[in-house]
Amino acid sequence: MNFSTTIFDRVMTTLAEPFTVSFVLRALLGGVLLAAVCALTGVWVIARGMTFLGEAMSHGMLPGVAIASIVGGNLVIGAAVSAFAMAAGVNALRDSREFGRDTSIGLFFVGMLSVGVIVVSHSRSFATDLTAFLFGDVLAIRTGDLLLLAGAGVLVAVIAAVFHRPFLALTFDPRKARTLGLRPDLANLVMMALLTITMAVAFSVVGTLLAFGMLIAPSAAAMLVTRRLPAVMLTSFLIGSAATVLGLWISWFAATAAGATIAATAVGIFFVILGARRLTTASPRATSLPRKGNQ
């Protein structure tokens, strides 16, 4: 009994070891807060088919970040302005007859990213490393970053609660939303702002890779488990939090990049749930051997 207790204590001590370090603990808190923010936004992004826009926006923030850094401004504001300008441009062209919505997103994506790289390449005073912009460093989260994430979480939660019915109507039937007086154009604009706030704040703390990974993977996995939107958001938060804990633990013992490991873990959880869902919903006829009488 004592021997088994000793083994259990050692295992628990080993599992808890990474989270006894202050910067890993801050990364854990930051990841959980990020999971909460992304859970409130990611569900709408997936439900409305805005995944490509989220990816494009995560890189389209570069011009704003570069200019803000050069003039000594706030990087979060620069990122938000750049992302919102891109979202507004895509929104203005969404009903174009000449080309589809994906084409307009792709054009703005390439255009904004190119402008950002040009600004960076012609400015020796640009202090923000492109590698940090893309991949971030979740282990470098500071107390101020945690407060920023918490504030963004409160703001996003308020917006999501106030506009829940318009968002719901816009997602499933925009024409009916208009007849009900729910103003789908305003709802669409607010949803774009919601995505902008989420990506701008998340990028500034953890980089675009983890920000986009946490925006999409947990929500996509949650939609495989349940369909009711409040339940999807809660499940997405739990999956994102679990990916943060497991990713940080793997990163600590495998000596891998923490942010990328958390993002990869979130994606891995999605595929595990997808595989389990397909196994449980597979038809018995498709998996059983045919009877002799039917041959």
Image (spheres, rainbow, N blue to C red):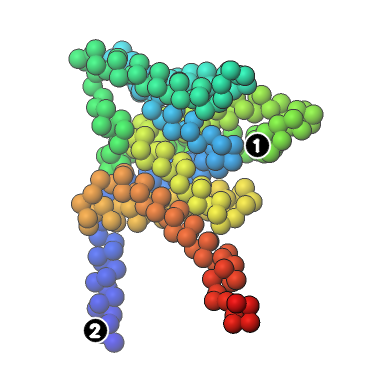
The quadrant of the picture occupied by the C terminus is: bottom right
Per the model, the C-alpha gap separating discs 2 and 1 is 58 Å
**183 horizontally vs 258: left or right:** right
Decide if residue 122 is in sight here.
yes
Residue 273 sits above or below residue 258 on the image: below
Q: Position of residue 142 (x, y in %)?
A: 30, 38
Identify the amino acid type marked 1: Thr
User: Residue at point 68% right, 38% down?
Assistant: 172
User: Residue at point 33% right, 53% down?
Assistant: 247
Which residue sits furthest bottom?
Answer: 1
The residue carrying mark 2 is: 3
Q: Position of residue 53 (x, y in %)?
A: 49, 30
User: Residue at point 36% right, 31% down?
Assistant: 204
Secondary element at image label 1: helix
Closer-to-camera residue (207/290)? 290
The disc placed on residue 171 is 1
Using the rendered view, name the quadrant where residue 147 is placed. Answer: top left
The disc placed on residue 249 is none
Q: Position of residue 2 (x, y in %)?
A: 26, 85
Identify the amino acid type marked 2: Phe
Using the rendered view, name the quadrant where residue 192 is placed. Answer: top right
Residue 125 sits above or below residue 133 on the image: above
User: Residue at point 35% right, 16% down?
Assistant: 115
Secondary element at image label 2: helix
Q: Earlier in the sequence, mark 2 or mark 1?
A: 2
Q: Position of residue 81 (x, y in %)?
A: 45, 19
Q: Nearer the viewer, mark 2 or mark 1?
A: 1
Decide if residue 142 is in sight here.
no
The quadrant of the picture occupied by the N terminus is: bottom left
